[in-house]
Amino acid sequence: MAQNQAGQPNAGGGQPRIPRWLSIVVMGRHPKVTMVRIAVLVVTSFVVFKFILLPIRIEGISMWPTYQDRSWNFVNRLAYLRHEPQRGDVVSIRLAGPHVMYLKRIIGLPGETVAFKNGRVLINGEMLNEPYEKSPCQWNCPPVVLGPNEYYVVGDNRTMPPELHKHGEILRSRIVGKLLL
Amino acid sequence: MKIIFRILLLAALAALGIWLWSVLFPDPEKVIRQRLVELARAASSLSNESDLARLAAAHRVAGFFSTNVELNVELPELNQHNSLTQEEITQAALFARSRAGGLQVKFPDINVMVAPGKRSATVDLTVTATAGSESESFVQEMKFTLHKIDGQWLITRVETVKTLSRCWPNSRCHFELCTAAGSFHS
């Protein structure tokens, strides 16, 4: 009978076995169960991080100070399954695909009129309270009426001229999801 | 055993046939994707590039375009609606490559739609360009139109896609007295 004690070679003179303690540390007491667990973990991670929570790295300062340049976050792709995007939500907006996206905050909802006057956002002519905007500036943009499937998005950092800051109307279909953290 | 061997042989022959077919008659979508990846590679440059290498690369970039390219580009710093010759594209590529610190161009998302006749195609793609000396990238969604000319897929039209409407020269937004200082690329 083959000797299965830790560190002991087989009686048949074959290759030395892995020490039992090491085998337990690496694969557990039930290797088959461990293998199944690893497989489940890999599949779950793939499904979660590919289709539900998209890991992203933020580049740029357009969402400063809420989100810092080169920080990491997740986009929840299921956030808008049960309800439509809300004002104040930070969303990711796809360009040609999901590998590079814009990160912006929704300030205008479908059907509303959005304008900037002396740096303040006007929704249907009324000033919008924006506690997340920490750097007041003097943007002036004429009113724009949003279509039935359009949202108005803008970054929190408005310290640059408006023509250098990517903002404006987007279609609902371009919103990939809501930022998780 | 003999039957298994014959089945395996047949499967191998079928795989070889499929591979040969894909090599001899490549899918236009695949060819276009490959050409665009090559274009991005050709448009990228190293910081210590010699003048001769720069010129050769600029000519290589121009080779991806037709003799006359229709241009419809609207960017905050550039607003062009005209056509470009291959010589002008070479000059533009040379200018871009002359930037200090090199240039890294990528097309991370490429969506190809080949027309039914397989003679023309439209490509919706994201362009990212990073100059070596800058920390932030230029990001823009663009649409290319390609035609099969003399057996080669060449870009005949380049246009910008307005993902967000207000970052354009005709947005009629303006800015007065900013309270913070610094340079921004948003």
Image (tube, rainbow, N blue to C red):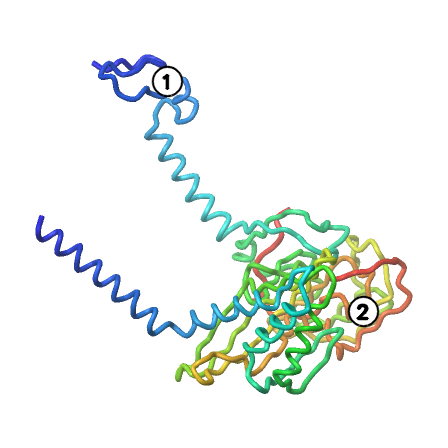
Q: How many marks?
A: 2
Give whichever of B132, A119 is nearer the camera.
B132
Q: Which quarter of the figure has residue B58?
A: bottom right
Residue at x-position 76% and y-position 57%? A156
Q: Which quarter of the figure has residue A178?
A: bottom right
Residue at x-position 80% and y-position 61%? A158
| Label 2: chain letter | A
Binning the other alpha carbons within 10 Å of mark 1 as few (below 14), some (14 to 19) or many (20 upward) gives some
Binning the other alpha carbons within 10 Å of mark 2 as few (below 14), some (14 to 19) or many (20 upward) gives many
Dot label at residue A77: none
Q: CA distance from mark 2 to mark 1?
A: 70 Å
Dot label at residue A20: 1
The single residue placed furthest to the left in the displayed view is B2
Is residue B90 positioned above or below A106 on the image?
A: below
Q: What x and y, as percent, mark residue A139?
A: 83, 68
Give whichever of B62, B129 is nearer the camera.
B62
Q: Earlier in the sequence, mark 2 or mark 1?
A: 1
Q: What x and y, as percent, mark residue A45?
A: 47, 44
Q: Are marks 2 and 1 on the same chain?
A: yes
Q: Is residue A1 left or right of residue A129?
A: left
* SS at mark 2 in the image: strand
* SS at mark 1 in the image: helix
Residue at x-position 47% and y-position 72%? B32
Q: Is residue A53 left or right of residue A154?
A: left
Q: What x and y, as percent, mark residue A165?
A: 75, 65
Q: Which quarter of the figure has residue B130?
A: bottom right
Q: Which residue is mark 2?
A: A116
Name the residue type under label 2. Phe
Give whichever of A18, B45 is nearer the camera.
B45
